[in-house]
Amino acid sequence: MRKYHIVALPGEGIGKEVVPAAITILKRLAELHGFSVSIEYGLIGQAALKELGAYFPEETAQLCQGKDGILFGAVSQGGLLELRQRFDFFANLRPVKVFPSLIDKSSLKSEMLEGVDILFVRELVSGIYFGASGRTQENTSGYHTMTYSDRDIRRIARIALTKAQQRRGLLTVAHKENALPHLPWTRLVFQEAVSFPEVTVTGMLVDNLAMQLVIDPQQFDVILAGNLFGDILSDLGGALVGSIGLLGSASLNSSGFAMYEAIHGTAPAIAGQGIANPLGTLASVVMMLEQWGELGAVQSLKQAQTKILECGYRTADLNPQAPEILVNTEQLIELLLNELSK
Ligand code: IPM
Ligand code: MG
């Protein structure tokens, strides 16, 4: 039997609700598709600081080492950047695909959303998040530096080009070369693209790209961005599909080891109420199953989700209107389990 060992790091806020919810589904999928998943829980964020003295303690790092994946919830501050850096999870993949039954939940007109299927490829362990930073001695000003080695741009470019090649062959590179000319993303990506002749590469200034995402999202296939621009642009993806609660992500290193996480964060306003949308974490579980090659399980889960959404079940973030039916986290999981057993 195929066996997988994962670490669950629920973290804080709704992370503590959606991670266990998604694990219930993962376990059922394993039973149905003939593989096994063992899960160890670890601490990160505030709880880790309290119990183990650090936001990302060495114990947690050791626990993750050598596993088949990390299922991550959310933290409000501390731990996440250290985790990404520790395992060199440089390739952050954030797919944004519209569910046809939720098309009216978007802030955009439905006809502009039909067929929208975008993959954001965000560089995750360099750029301004990890550049030199500090406050001056007088404590009157502060700085964060956006530094990118050509090598780091080239390696994420190859990931984005590979993905574009497997999809519709279009790659848009977010950059800001009119103001930041020493970060020549476009030139470096074009050079790497020589090995990917089927991919059409377009450079786009990031400010224009943000506007284009809202006025014509159908033009995009793969969007490559550095750490900060990718963070900002991918939240726009949440607005496109109707709720950031629907989006998942995978962050991989060069050996294919990865952490899987919904992109919504801790959502303190709704935490503790049992009403969070587990579909973002389940979208991340889909990416984990794809990475393992468990494609039968991927198909079952996607079918069950589509069915439940078509039947009108919605968590609160999707603002259900009659005849849609409001459900909480537990009810949605129960519905999915029933659907999987059919
Ligand atoms: C994300 C989040 C994080 C980021 C925060 C929590 C540091 O916004 O994963 O998109 O900026 O990378
Ligand atoms: Mg973000």
Image (spheres, grey):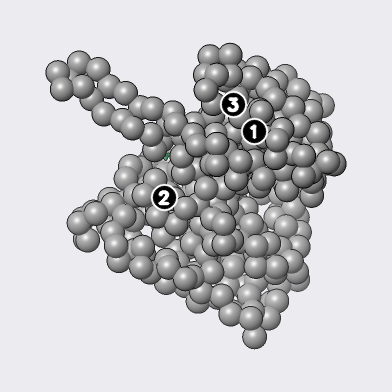
Real-space CA distance between mark 2 and mark 1, rounded to the nearest whole angstrom:
23 Å
Real-space CA distance between mark 1 and mark 3, rounded to the nearest whole angstrom:
6 Å
Task: Give x and y (percent) for residue 237.
Answer: 63, 34
Label 1 residue near ligand 1, CB within 8 Å: no
Question: What residue type is disc 1 on?
Answer: Leu
* Vertical order, 334 against 149 (above or below): below
Horizontal side of residue 197 vs 78, given as left or right: right
In the image, 247 versus 200, the foreground residue is: 200
Crowd tier of the residue under label 2, counting other residues whose Cα lies within 10 Å: few below 14, some 14–19, many 20 or above = some
> Is the Cβ of the residue at disc 1 closer than 8 Å to that at disc 3?
yes
Real-space CA distance between mark 3 and mark 2, rounded to the nearest whole angstrom:
23 Å
| Ligand 1 quarter of the rendering | top left
Task: Give x and y (percent) for residue 285.
Answer: 60, 59
At 81% from the left and 39% from the top, the residue drawn is: 199
> Residue under circle 3?
184
> Residue under circle 2?
85
> Residue under circle 1?
188
In the image, 59 versus 157, the foreground residue is: 157
Q: What secondary structure is found at the residue carrying circle 2? A: helix
The numbered mark, 2 or 1, whose residue comes first in the sequence reads 2
